[in-house]
Amino acid sequence: MKLEIQRQDFLKAWQTAEKVVSSKSVADIMGCIRINAKEEGQVILEATDLKTSVRYKTSGVTVIEGGEAVLPAAILGNMLRKLTSDTFTIDVNEKRGILDAGKSRMKFPFVSADEFPHIPDSQGAESICEIISGDLKRMISEGGSASSAPQDFPKYIGACLLRTTENSLRIVSTDGKRLAISERFCTVNRKDENSMLTSGALKDLAKQLPDTENVRIFSDGPVVWFSISDVEFSIRKIEATFPEYERILGTDIHTILNISCAELISVVERIDIVAKTTLSHIMVMDMTSDHQLKITSISPEQGIARESLEADITGESLQVGFNAGYFLEGLKAFGTGDIEIEFSGAEGQTRMTRKDDSSFLYMLMPSRLSPQDLVDDELNDSSQSQYQEENLEGEGNF
């Protein structure tokens, strides 16, 4: 195989493939990228970590001699980024691989293409839907905000559910303490399709999506493909059952808070400096009918953090506790603009949505409070000694 390559175009394709490899080790074939150069001039890069794969039809490459080669991703990627020459050649034969860029020359190891895992393409797979890439990026950020670190059981903890309705795509995640649902209208070709994919793979996909292109989503058995012009990503499904989240969506609302999301993020980030030093990461929100919102966190070791602000509050006065980290992750998924937070009491579900926009819903359960979380002034010695035992109850479940 021998190729003449325009560096800038090829580097973009190589970097996209490089993000999928699972290892920087030259000895590990999962840390390599396969180049398939066809005699008619088409060049395809492939990379996989066995759960996620990418196939990229490159431009800016002239095929002098066709063939296949599996090349080390990291070492060649670093060289490509450092080259100053606009063009170079890659020549791979039975004995060695050589990169030649005029004054720069490099010999590198390679692996037989026969050892590289087969990456299926979407030919013959059934189309699920088509959606604007910018919408899909936003949905992954929103809908994946309630997933936690992957666990062996239950598997849905570190996953997202992709579900099609008659005219929309929905992305859902939950870890039992919170729930996130993001939905956008799109062209649906197969409704009632359910695919569970790892949230980490989806978030990696989102980083590589453009903003304005169409993404075609296909499914065939255990694999889901995301196709954008010359690039095709594939993610293996998780074989598990996702919770029946629809049955918990209805709830009685007792208190409603309307507030600027950016303002609330700023406040909670400061409160979290203390909250994250406590065993259960708790902050307490006090809302009164005179439109006063107070947020407090108490740590025996780090002291008390408290902020007060005026807010649009309707309904009953309420004192409720939350895991500050979970609360903050939900807020950050909304970004800017005004949000509406609906509370169903100190132990019921809490719902966040954008003002006048129901496309994204973030729900979480309050934390159970101990007396030490509600101290108004400085902690006394007895409360310090009891804090660790009495403040371990944590959050409720849906």
Image (tube, rainbow, N blue to C red):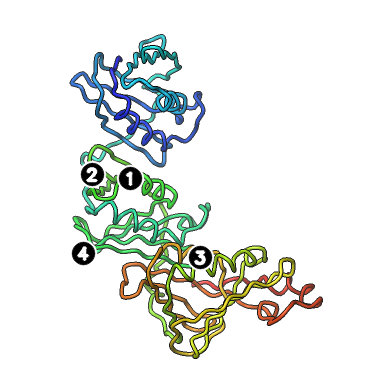
Question: In the picture, residue 108 is in which quadrant?
Answer: top left
Question: In the picture, residue 131 is in which quadrant?
Answer: bottom left
In this view, the mark in front (4 or 2): 4
Q: Identify whether 50 is placed above or below 294.
A: above
Q: Give the Cα separation between the discs numbered 3 and 1.
A: 33 Å
Q: Secondary structure at mark 3?
A: helix
Mark 4 residue crowding within 10 angstroms, few (<14) / some (14–19) / many (20+) = few
223 relative position to 156: left or right: left
- Residue 372 horizontal/vertical position (percent): 70, 78
In this view, the mark in front (4 or 3): 3
Q: Give the Cα separation between the discs numbered 4 and 2.
A: 20 Å
- Residue 4 horizontal/vertical position (percent): 28, 17
Most extreme residue toward the right is: 381
Q: Earlier in the sequence, mark 4 or mark 3?
A: 4
Mark 2 residue crowding within 10 angstroms, few (<14) / some (14–19) / many (20+) = some
Residue under label 3: 328
Mark 3 residue crowding within 10 angstroms, few (<14) / some (14–19) / many (20+) = some
Q: Secondary structure at mark 1?
A: strand
Residue found 31% across the figure and 75% down from its top: 356
Residue type beneath disc 1: Val
Q: Give the Cα separation between the discs numbered 1 and 4.
A: 22 Å
- Residue 128 horizontal/vertical position (percent): 23, 53
- Residue 68 horizontal/vertical position (percent): 32, 20
Q: Identify whether 171 is placed above or below 46.
A: below
